[in-house]
Amino acid sequence: MLNEDLLTGDRRSGATPADDRQAFRAPAPAAPPSDDAVTLLRDAILNKLAYALGRTPATARDRDWFAATALALRDRVVDACLASPAPAVPNKRVYYLSAEFLIGRLLSDMMGNLGLADTARAALAQLGVDLDAVAGAEPDAALGNGGLGRLAACFMESLASLSIPAYGYGIRYDHGLFRQLIEDGVQREVPETWLAEGNPWEFERPEAACSVGFGGEVAMTVQPDGSIRRVWRPAETVRAVPHDTPVLGWRAKHVNVLRLWQARAEEPVDLGRFNGGDHVGAVAERSRAEAISRVLYPSDSTPAGHELRLRQEFFFTSASLQDLVRRHVAERGDLRSLPDHAAIQLNDTHPAIAVPELMRLLVDEHGLSWEDAWHVTTHTLAYTNHTLLPEALETWPVELMERLLPRHMQIIYLINWMHLESLSKHGRVDAGSLAAVSLIDETHGKRVRMGHLAFLGARRVNGVSALHTELMRQTVFAPLHALDTDKIVNKTNGITFRRWLHNANPGLTQLAVEAVGARVLDDPGALDGLAAFAEDAGFQARYAAVRRGRKEALARVVRERTGIRLDPGALFDVQIKRIHEYKRQLLNILETVALYQAILAEPHRDWPARVKIFAGKAAPSYHQAKLIIRLASDVAKRVNADPAVAGRLTVAFVPNYSVSLAEAIIPAADLSEQISTAGLEASGTGNMKLALNGALTIGTLDGANIEIKEHVGDDNIFIFGLDAAGVQATKAEPGYAVRAIAASPRLKAALDLIASGGFSPGEPDRFRPLLDEVTGPDRYLLTVDFDDYWRAQRAVDAAWRRPHGWWRAAILNTARTAWFSSDRTMREYAEDIWRVRVGPGA
């Protein structure tokens, strides 16, 4: 794709000197680099080091070598744009709006998709520089909280690899997800500073900035034809400045753009106040404006924090819609044709305000009739729902909306009135039924239901796994689904194999290439050919050797971060994800305590060596989740210090979970913990990444675990616990936790040890809030599922003792998870939701 913004911006900046540009070659990862290619890239890196960074090889740090290498590679991405035969104006573009893009480090992606990884390593080696040290100096762009943001990043890479023209739109947070420190088991949050030394991948686009308004009033004016036009006069405007990061597809066949918006004040300083001596007050408005893009997900526990969240969501949504509308008008003219040339995907409810904002732009700014604007809106927007948890389905107080976005609240009221009026005309006049589908929830004060708003404004609404989609129809959107039974569709999530296999696990990738051919690099489906080698003892030995190498590497990382020594020969049992009660890290910890007690009780039993690895961050205000982290840390402290279990059980909580840490843990994992309460995990993508790399899953019938089970086979996964229907039936029976604890001496003993201060000497009540939840309401049914979880874990022990069977199952997991490629997911979106062509010339 010849992206006009990327190309024009690069020409203006002069960022691609002619002597550097010759280095671009069609990627061929399997071929050794030529001497000429190595020399050209080496010289380009030196050029950037000197002229872009002002450094010499003698004074350069690893961070400088990273920036120089990134800038040299970025030039070759621009070369890919220039070399593309695609038309400047594609027939249709996808616009992906997401509050999160968990990008992580980009160097490996860029090198891999350009086919220059070996060339870069050789070029840097000639300069006496180690590529691994350079790659490690790149900060993680932690612009997301977890699966939602990482999914968006995977989707962007797949869109480019499939040559689907696309823009990703989000916020350029100065500080992404906090950096997690663990001090005496307690999580402490400090700012994450990924932009401290700039971002060499991006292009700033000040000429494409736009203004976003807040507050003010709505005036009515009479037009010459007698019609009434409403004019929003904001009390405050904020400048949205785009920063573009090129998103390179596999083999550099196509380049898309991730456009992230930075908030700036319209005026940087009030000179009158400054010159009057009020030096702090003179920049107050600037601070207020720039707070919008300062921090990912500021705490909303205060009214000011709540308002800032809404300001963030409207800021990036409005800027993105203004940008794409401007582009369409410049290219096509008539906005009535927008659905033919644009597909706008709302990633969860954060950008749901797009429904009234697009209507405002079409009606108020561009003069379309309400009917035409509604047709355009409902045929251009699509909405992905990611959760069934009521607290995660956003609602906003009407009072806040009326104060901050008065025109949008008028539009929402009108959409709602027309929606309810149409139902009344068709005989649906029951007050309860109308209240259930209304955009305004009046049960506890008036609030705008953003999920309902997105549902009404979208052409398609999709879930992200088969179970999640069906539960959407039955629960959160059941009343709306009854009105339009064709609107909800399923699009099971996927992951990009380029990052999560090729880059994260090159040893396994090379093994696959040797076994079934280089086509596995281009076609994930070719991995299925590995199934033929699952019984081959020689192939199993090589597969196990690759795993052993990654476990040794992870052991070094854990040792550096925690001081804990891991035995690479042990079973690595991994749970890595956001800390949340429904994800049930606490169930895993309880089983760990019970296992610890069992080993102490039966020391002569043949217990297989096991390492329990936890990683994840708790939201700063989520006290129960932070207490789970402390319990995991305290359990690790006692277990690891007890010589009676040495060599048989080790526990590690690894701090500051990130994309880069995931890339270290996932290829080393033997067992993948996917143990959420059935019916609450929408999909999961960590389960896919771990299965692809050969970890066996222990999990509930929840989210995409169900589809993983269908693909890898019942014998190659460990399933336990209630299914979604069983969870609902159990919750209808009072006292289930008390009965479950009474029926499980093992569970009761584990709870008693925690309650007695066994892991918190001198403070026995430290974990009382956790125990009160488990022994009382137990909303996430840990007590009910515990015994079956214990049974499944002992089945894991038995399987681990049979290496031939274990490695057979691991190889089959890798072979049969090709379906979970995000390329497949994007093809399904393209065909069923966006109606765009896949491939060159789209």
Image (cartoon, rainbow, N blue to C red):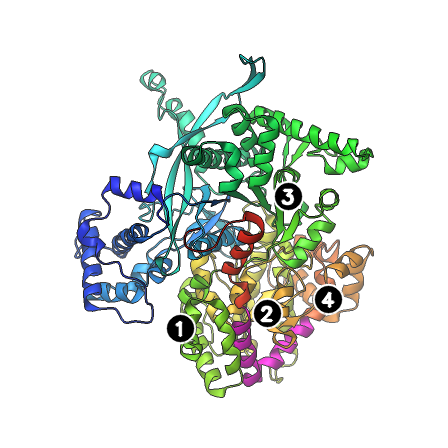
Q: Is residue 365 left or right of residue 627?
A: left
**Vertical relation: 268 (above or below) 275:** below
Residue denoted by label 4: 748
**Vertical relation: 174 (above or below) 667:** above
Q: Amino acid at mark 3?
A: Leu
**Mark 4 → mark 1, Cα distance in angstroms:** 53 Å
**Vertical relation: 416 (above or below) 678:** above
- In depth, the one of 70 and 675 nearer the eye is 70
Residue denoted by label 3: 393
Q: Residue at x 64, y 37 (%)?
A: 453
**Mark 2 → mark 1, Cα distance in angstroms:** 28 Å
Residue 697's label in the rendered image is 2
Instruction: Give the crowd class for mark 4: few <14, some 14-19, many >=20 residues within 10 Å.
Output: some
Q: Amino acid at mark 4?
A: Lys
Q: Nearer the viewer, mark 4 or mark 1?
A: 1
Q: Earlier in the sequence, mark 4 or mark 1?
A: 1
- Is 155 contained in the magenta span? no
Q: Amino acid at mark 1?
A: Ala
Instruction: Give the crowd class for mark 1: few <14, some 14-19, many >=20 residues within 10 Å.
Output: some
Element type at marker 3?
Answer: loop
Q: Amino acid at mark 2?
A: Thr
Name the spot of residue 613 as percent of width and height, x first. 52, 66
**Mark 3 → mark 4, Cα distance in angstroms:** 35 Å
Q: Earlier in the sequence, mark 2 or mark 4?
A: 2
Numbered range of the magenta stretch? 790-817
Residue 637 in sight: no
Residue denoted by label 1: 518
Q: Residue at x 48, y 26 (%)?
A: 213
**Residues at circles 3 and 4 in contact by the CB criterion of under 8 Å:** no
Task: Tell me the chief SS of the magenta region.
Answer: helix
Q: Earlier in the sequence, mark 3 or mark 1?
A: 3
**Residues at circles 3 and 2 in contact by the CB criterion of under 8 Å:** no
